[in-house]
Image (cartoon, rainbow, N blue to C red):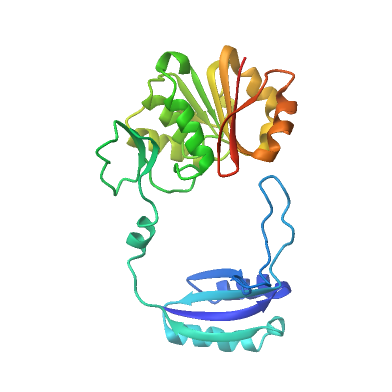
């Protein structure tokens, strides 16, 4: 494999990337050319907020090609294009062969939710202390147990019993990890819904792999009232969904919300005040878990 590295101004990144794609690059990556320097720029905003800007002032664009000849041909073809003005070729270098599957897997280790409840990728052995576990590999849908919001939701579930969980709704289920966690702690009547069909499919597959029963579907599959309603999304959609989520909580039932930054606690309390009184139940790395009983 050979990589062609380019320095590209902000207004040319899209055109150069499109051209590299047309030239059959195996992959194309874009990164801040000034990363780790005083000139580094934040590109992404906080959850629920618009990005501060659309692109970096200077980007390093790297395209991967199967052969040296293909990389050099791409360099020559780009150099004569009008849109390449202001761009710079940094060089062509051979990329050492690696076991990419093993390299990717090495980044995901078992995650302990409680001392005896673990999230474990399928290529790892179960920890000896794992009384309960969820087997889950990284995939297309959010939720592998590594993010603080997911861990806090699972910790809350782990403190419950089957009777208190009752009928469960996982709204915005992603990988299905919360619904599967509820099943591991005894819940037997579980609906897991998401607006993304890929998440629905991922949830169904992960549930089967973990030997648990649940119903996965689009949001219209959520029907009636539930003893436990879980929603690990983000603050902005949680505000919009307040009437819908609260309508699904049975009298005496629990509402569990995550994806909320500490500074967003008051606005969530205000949004849900007409129906329930939210309180902060857990916190980790700047994120909070908010719960209420109806």
Residue 262 falls in image quadrant: top right
Residue 214: tell me if it is visible.
Answer: no
Q: Residue 160 location in percent, x, y?
A: 44, 21
- Which residue is pictured at 69% across the width and 26% down the height? 242
Q: Is residue 53 left or right of residue 229?
A: right
The residue lying furthest to the top in this view is 251
Please name whichever residue, 110 or 190, is drawn nearer the observer in this view of the structure. 110
Q: Is residue 164 above or below residue 50?
A: above
Q: Is residue 275 above or below residue 82?
A: above
Quadrant of the frame with the C terminus: top right
- Which residue is pictured at 40% across the width and 19% down the height? 188
Q: Residue 126 location in percent, x, y?
A: 27, 41
Q: Is residue 172 above or below residue 190?
A: below
Please name whichever residue, 111 or 62, is drawn nearer the observer in this view of the structure. 111
Quadrant of the frame with the N terminus: bottom left
Q: Residue 279 location in percent, x, y?
A: 63, 25
Please name whichever residue, 35 or 5, is drawn nearer the observer in this view of the structure. 35
Q: Residue 252 location in percent, x, y?
A: 57, 11
Residue 189: tell me if it is visible.
Answer: yes
Q: Is residue 14 left or right of residue 147?
A: right
Q: Is residue 97 above or below residue 202?
A: below
Q: Is residue 145 left or right of residue 257?
A: left
Residue 56 falls in image quadrant: bottom right
Residue 211 falls in image quadrant: top left
């Amino acid at each position: 494999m050979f990589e062609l590295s380019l320095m590209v101004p902000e207004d040319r990144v899209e055109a150069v990337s499109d051209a590299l794609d047309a030239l059959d690059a195996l992959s194309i990556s874009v990164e801040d050319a000034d990363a780790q320097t005083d000139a580094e720029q934040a590109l992404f905003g906080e959850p629920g907020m618009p990005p501060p800007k659309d692109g970096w002032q200077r980007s390093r664009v790297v395209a991967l090609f199967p052969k040296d000849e293909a990389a050099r041909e791409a360099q020559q073809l780009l150099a004569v294009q009008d849109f390449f003005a202001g761009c710079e070729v940094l060089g062509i270098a051979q990329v050492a062969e690696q076991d990419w599957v093993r390299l990717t897997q090495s980044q995901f280790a078992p995650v302990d939710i409680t001392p005896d409840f673990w999230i474990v990728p399928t290529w790892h052995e179960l920890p000896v202390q794992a009384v309960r576990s969820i087997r889950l590999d990284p995939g297309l849908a959010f939720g592998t147990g590594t993010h603080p919001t997911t861990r806090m939701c699972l910790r809350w579930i782990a403190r419950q019993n089957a009777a208190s969980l009752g009928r469960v709704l996982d709204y915005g289920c992603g990988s299905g990890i919360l619904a599967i966690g509820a099943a591991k702690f005894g819940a037997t009547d579980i609906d897991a819904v998401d607006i993304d069909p890929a998440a629905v499919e991922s949830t169904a597959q992960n549930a089967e792999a973990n030997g648990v029963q649940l119903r996965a579907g689009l949001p219209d599959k959520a029907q009636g009232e539930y003893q436990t309603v879980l929603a690990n999304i983000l603050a902005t959609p949680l505000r919009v969904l307040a009437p819908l989520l609260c309508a699904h909580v049975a009298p005496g039932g629990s509402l569990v919300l995550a994806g909320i930054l500490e500074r967003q606690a008051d606005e969530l309390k205000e949004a849900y005040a007409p129906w329930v009184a939210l309180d902060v139940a857990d916190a980790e790395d700047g994120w909070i878990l908010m719960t209420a009983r109806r």
